[in-house]
Amino acid sequence: MFFSIIIPLYNRPQEINELLFTLTKQTYLQFEVLVIEDGSKNDAKAIVESYANKLDVKYYFKENAGQGFARNFGFERAKGDYFVIFDSDCLIPSNYLEIVKNYLYEHDLDAYGGPDAAHESFTPVQKAISYSMTSPFTTGGIRGNKKHVGRFHPRSFNMGVSRQAWEKVGGFILTRLGEDIEYSIRIHENGFKIGLIPDAKVYHKRRTSFGQFYKQLHFFGRARINIYKHFPKELKLIHFFPAVATVGMITTLLMNIFYPPLAYVLDFLVILYFMLIFFHSWSVNKSLKVAFLSIISSFIQLTAYGLGFIQDLFKRVVFKQQ
């Protein structure tokens, strides 16, 4: 089995350097790497070309059109049996392709996704963000969990598609706003089999500050409504949880200001919820600092996603704006 690893890139030369270095350590060597520079001003051509004697790597520069269409550009030039998509801010364990190859031979998936985790080199903020995106106490727990809700939809930071599926389904038709979920839905609808490979994890840096994380999650909330506009049946009750939690926390704040006696129960529930997050993060990360920061990152995850979801729910569904 030959893999084509496709990496869209936009103004992140240092990240691609770190990702390519981890790919030089792979135990399974039947793969090529295609780096698609999507109109970056700060390009990584010299960095990518410095790996020419270590990897079968190709560098392409195209006009900016977004990550989904950059991946399509790579699909069209890849020669692998299987296309593997990574975000540029990932670090790849040395046995990743070995795990994927063995699993695909046993389970015959047409597309797959894998979970993410925090690397030991990550900052405390990055570890807290990683926790909030993978914890069972936040909506992030469904992203790489065996017990996911409904059909499994791979996320494009760690996703694979067979050449056969791509040749029938085509590539991404959205370049942003939930493009990976939309793509996996079409793969499902064309009769192909998609599954989670539980051990095919990557170390996903995501964002390096809470401000950047807020913007990303607000975007994710809007993306869920974008998916709903294409596939109404894919909007599940669990997708409303961040919005409901956001409204609940705003209500709790208002009650504490205007009528404190009615806020006691809500205060208790909010405190209990974030205590569960604190102690669970402490047990997972073995760090009090990361546990405290996990309260902040989980709060941001819920409210940013919730506000983005509510914003486009009213804008695009209630008021039917484009």
Image: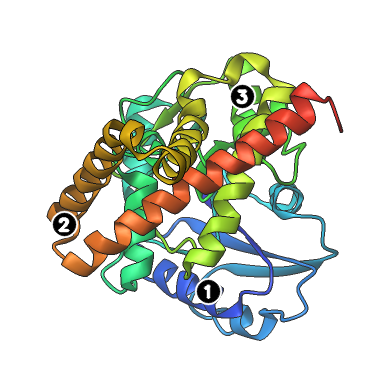
Q: Marks 1 and 2, how far apart in space?
A: 28 Å
Residue that numbered label 3 is attached to: 185
Quarter holding residue 270: top left
Crowd rating for badge 2 (residues with CA inside 10 Å; few <14, some 14–19, many 20+): some
Compared to residue 52, the image places residue 113 above or below, namely above
Q: Residue 222, position in %: x, y?
A: 66, 40
Do residues under tags 3 and 1 come within 8 Å of each other at their CB atoms?
Answer: no
Q: Which label belongs to residue 282?
A: 2
Could you say whether the residue bearing mark 1 is in a helix, strand or loop?
Answer: helix
Residue that numbered label 1 is attached to: 15
Q: Marks 3 and 2, how far apart in space?
A: 36 Å
> Which of 11 and 294 lies nearest the eye of the viewer?
294
Could you say whether the residue bearing mark 2 is in a helix, strand or loop?
Answer: helix
Q: Name the residue type under label 1.
A: Glu
Q: Residue 157, position in %: x, y?
A: 51, 51
Left or right side of 135 for 69: right
- Residue 281 visible in rendering: yes
Q: Name the residue type under label 2.
A: Trp
Q: Earlier in the sequence, mark 3 or mark 1?
A: 1
Q: Could you tell me which residue is drawn at 75 percent across and 23 percent down? A: 317
Q: Could you tell me which residue is drawn at 75 percent across and 39 percent down? A: 174
Q: Could you tell me which residue is drawn at 47 percent across and 36 percent down? A: 251
Crowd rating for badge 1 (residues with CA inside 10 Å; few <14, some 14–19, many 20+): some
Q: Earlier in the sequence, mark 3 or mark 2?
A: 3
Q: Name the residue type under label 3.
A: Ile
Q: Could you tell me which residue is drawn at 69 percent across and 47 percent down? A: 75
